[in-house]
Image (cartoon, coloured by chain):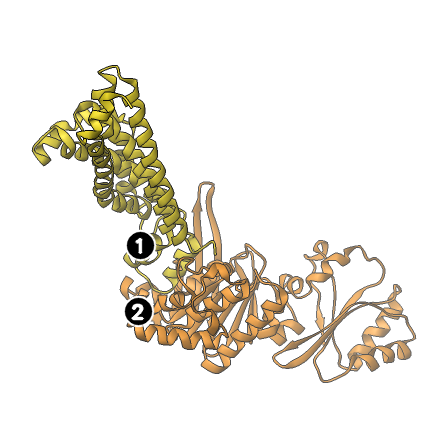
């Protein structure tokens, strides 16, 4: 192990980087789901073949999601920094990055949720209607519980995507492994550090993927 | 009582409008098992969905126990639906819930406490014979078991009516029989009025009291099963009653007649008597007995001799002996012709 790497480890920079990456990813995902989950549900419910079609609302939300999804993250990141400053008081560091990650993840998560819930069997929804369930009950007792395994798989994919974004955020002053790779590796022409950061990221992604999919499989009662 | 009055249902499609129901009027009495039979696309699934307003008719009225469904507020309609259970061809169970929790589901919607709901669910599992499966998930059950759970679920709120949309169409013959028996038991023991949608005559003559025959968005005839069975008026009814005979088109030769035996006379001496009395050969093309409403019904398709003098002899003999028969013109190509029932 090279000297500089040893130093980073001894100073706790590397450990902090790992922690920051994990922490930014999960906190951002949490806040993004607070908006993305209801948004995804509304997209399904208000659709033409949904349980409560509202054409205009559906078209507007659909368009908004598409617009935000088509902006490359690196541009969105810079563009929303003023907003981050407004919300958390700074445009630097983890807090600011969380704001940008949440904004970038919301439309992504909304689409994930939408496609998961669309998979729920129409017959089951019809059965719920026949029992006299109203729309809200159908959402909370049928759509979300029946889509739970798919929603969990979607969450795993979203987490990995957000983790990728968070590494990019390192270039403009966000913390985490991305920042270490950029400042200690790329800018100082030290390939070893870059690769170490890549390896660590791979390990984190693997862990999220493995554990997440295991949970998703366990909750799915269809494959007995 | 369920009353359907002049129901029309149109669907708007990209290619224009499509009429699924045309001026359908029916009355379904309390306590009966009412069948609606028709080929796929006849409109029967749409019709049954109009009963609980899963499909809103374009015009016409649905009246259940005096309540006009079109006049109800949404909340009242949801409440009324709790009094109408429904089961489906695809069972439509919640895959992520246990059997017990599936049966609790309509009770949760109704606002029944968890403890009470589970108690009721266990009673129902006993009724449908699946007490040992309460912790199982739907994916662990066979088709017949799934439909039993669906029936238990539909009965959880103690509805007065049960709608069955092709409930046995995905099941094998043995399972179909056991599900039909269960439905009859529910009707007799709990007094639930049952509406059965099917394309199988067997389902109708096993459990139904009355039947409506549907074809091309229209109800072509309604009546007691035994009556419709022995005297089918519409072409579609004839076709549905004797689906096997579609394959007989290629048989040429003399006229064919359909005899119906209603349990009070016997076939065997009748046949030999015809042959002896008329001195003509007869060809049996088809014979079957059915149990309709606990009474044995037999039917037989006979091919008469080619010359009209001999065949007239047979007809006269049958008329003289009061045997119900009709000219049989089975086969698609003859659907346009109407056989006259003579009795």
Left or right relative to A134: residue B330: right
User: Decide: marks 2, 1 in contact (CB < 8 A)?
Assistant: no
Which image quadrant: the C terminus of chain B? bottom right
Front-most of residues B13 and B136: B136
Q: Residue at x 34, y 71 (%)?
A: B67
Q: Residue at x 70, y 59 (%)?
A: B337
User: How far apart are the two marked residues, 2 and 1, measured between alpha carbons?
Assistant: 16 Å
State whether residue B149 is above or below residue B268. above
Front-most of residues A98 and B168: A98
Judging from the image, what secondary structure is the residue with disc 2 in?
helix
Residue holding disc 1: A139
Residue holding disc 2: B110
Q: Residue at x 35, y 56 (%)?
A: A142
- Disc 2 is attached to a residue of which chain? B
Asked whether residue B200 appears in the rendered view, the answer is yes
Asked whether residue A59 appears in the rendered view, the answer is no
Tell me what hue chain A is rendered in.
Answer: yellow
Spot occupied by residue B144 in the image (x, y as percentages of width and height):
54, 66
Q: Quadrant of residue B229?
A: bottom right
The total of numbered circles placed on residues is 2
Front-most of residues B222 and B45: B45
Q: Judge the density around disc 2: few (<14), some (14-19), many (≥20) Cα neighbours within 10 Å.
A: some
Q: Judge the density around disc 1: few (<14), some (14-19), many (≥20) Cα neighbours within 10 Å.
A: some
> What chain is colored orange?
B
Spot occupied by residue A24 in the image (x, y as percentages of width and height):
21, 36
Spot occupied by residue B83 in the image (x, y as percentages of width and height):
37, 71
State whether residue A164 is above or below residue B64. above
Spot occupied by residue B164 in the image (x, y as percentages of width and height):
49, 66
Residue found at the far right of this picture: B279
Residue found at the far bottom of this picture: B264
- Disc 1 is attached to a residue of which chain? A
């Amino acid at each position: 192990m090279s000297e500089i790497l040893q130093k980073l480890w001894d100073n706790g920079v590397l450990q902090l980087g790992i922690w920051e990456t994990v922490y930014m990813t999960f906190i951002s995902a949490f806040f993004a789901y607070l908006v993305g989950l209801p948004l995804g549900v509304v997209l399904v419910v208000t659709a033409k073949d949904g349980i409560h079609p509202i054409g205009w609302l559906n078209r507007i939300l659909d368009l908004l999601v598409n617009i935000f999804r088509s902006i490359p993250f690196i541009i969105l990141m810079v563009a929303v920094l003023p907003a981050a400053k407004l919300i958390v008081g700074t445009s630097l560091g983890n807090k600011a990055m969380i704001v940008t990650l949440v904004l970038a993840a919301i439309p992504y998560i909304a689409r994930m949720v939408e496609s998961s819930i669309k998979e729920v069997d129409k017959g089951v929804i019809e059965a719920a209607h026949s029992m006299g369930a109203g729309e809200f009950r159908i959402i909370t007792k049928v759509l979300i519980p029946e889509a739970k395994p798919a929603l969990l798989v979607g969450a795993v994919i979203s987490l990995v995507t957000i983790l990728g974004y968070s590494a990019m955020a390192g270039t403009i002053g966000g913390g985490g492994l991305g920042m270490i790779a950029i400042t200690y590796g790329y800018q100082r022409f030290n390939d070893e550090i870059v690769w170490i950061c890549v390896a660590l990221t791979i390990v984190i992604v693997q862990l999220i993927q493995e554990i997440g999919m295991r949970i998703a499989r366990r909750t799915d009662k269809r494959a007995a | 009582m369920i009353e359907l009055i002049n129901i029309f249902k149109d669907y708007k499609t990209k290619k224009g409008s499509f009429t699924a129901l045309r001026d359908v009027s029916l009355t379904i009495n309390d306590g009966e098992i009412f069948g609606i039979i028709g080929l796929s696309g006849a409109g029967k699934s749409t019709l049954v969905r109009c009963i609980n307003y899963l499909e809103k008719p374009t015009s016409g009225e649905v009246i259940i126990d005096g309540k006009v469904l079109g006049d109800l507020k949404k909340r009242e309609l949801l409440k009324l639906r709790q009094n109408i259970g429904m089961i489906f061809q695809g069972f439509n169970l919640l895959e992520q819930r246990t059997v017990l929790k599936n049966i609790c589901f309509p009770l949760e919607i109704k606002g029944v406490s968890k403890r009470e709901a589970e108690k009721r669910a266990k009673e129902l599992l006993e009724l449908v014979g699946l007490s040992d499966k309460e912790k199982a998930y739907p994916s662990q059950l066979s088709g017949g078991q799934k439909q039993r759970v669906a029936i238990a679920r539909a009965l959880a709120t103690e509805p007065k009516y049960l709608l069955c949309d092709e409930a046995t169409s995905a099941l094998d013959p043995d399972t179909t029989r056991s599900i039909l028996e269960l439905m009859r038991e529910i009707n007799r023991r709990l007094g639930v009025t049952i509406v059965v949608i099917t394309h199988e005559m067997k389902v109708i003559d096993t459990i139904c009291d009355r039947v409506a025959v549907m074809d091309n968005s229209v109800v072509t005839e309604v009546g007691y099963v035994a009556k419709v069975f022995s005297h089918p008026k519409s072409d579609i009814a004839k076709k549905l009653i004797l689906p096997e005979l579609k394959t007989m088109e290629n048989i040429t030769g003399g006229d064919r007649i359909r005899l119906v035996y209603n349990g009070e006379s016997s076939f065997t001496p009748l046949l030999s008597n015809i042959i002896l009395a008329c001195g003509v050969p007869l060809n049996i093309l088809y014979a079957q007995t059915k149990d309709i409403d606990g009474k044995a019904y037999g039917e037989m398709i006979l091919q008469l001799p080619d010359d009209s003098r001999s065949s007239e002899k047979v007809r006269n003999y049958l008329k003289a002996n009061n045997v119900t028969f009709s000219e049989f013109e089975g086969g698609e190509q003859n659907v346009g012709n109407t056989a006259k029932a003579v009795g």
